[in-house]
Amino acid sequence: KFDAKTNRVKGLAFHPHRPWILASLHNGVIQLYDYRMEILLESFEEHEGPVRGIDFHKTQPLFVSGGDDYKVKVWNYQNRRCLYTLHGHLDYIRTVYF
């Protein structure tokens, strides 16, 4: 049984090939877990407020996130950094999809 203590989870995404899951949290953090090894692999912290939408790219080492800060971010999980931030939305980002 895998058990982790986090802030409220707003979104989840399963990696298409690896035993990984992304959890987007109410406090603005995105956590990457290996559910087979039952460990936290990485945390990503650039959103200001809850992150509601999260999705892995199907072939590239990327994921996308969107949150209550009106921003969509594209991340490279191998480099452990945000590549792009898309501004200009007028409301919360509730869902994202590659």
Image (tube, rainbow, N blue to C red):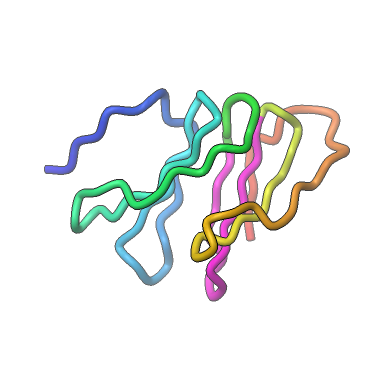
Q: Residue at x 71, y 28 (%)?
A: 69
| 42 vs 90, nearest the viewer | 42
Quadrant in which the C terminus appears:
bottom right
Which percent across, then down, holds residue 51? 57, 33
Task: Report which quarter residue 18 is drawn in.
Answer: bottom left
Q: Main secondary structure of the magenta part?
A: strand
The residue sitting at the bottom extreme is: 59
Q: Residue at x 20, y 50 (%)?
A: 38
Which percent across, then down, holds residue 89? 83, 36
Which percent across, then down, holds residue 12? 44, 44
| 73 vs 59, nearest the viewer | 73
- Indicate whether residue 60 is drawn in magenta: yes
Q: Residue at x 65, y 27 (%)?
A: 48
**Residue range highlighted in magenta:** 53-67
Which percent across, then down, holds residue 16? 42, 67
Is residue 61 left or right of 1 when viewed as pictured? right
Quadrant in which the N terminus appears:
top left
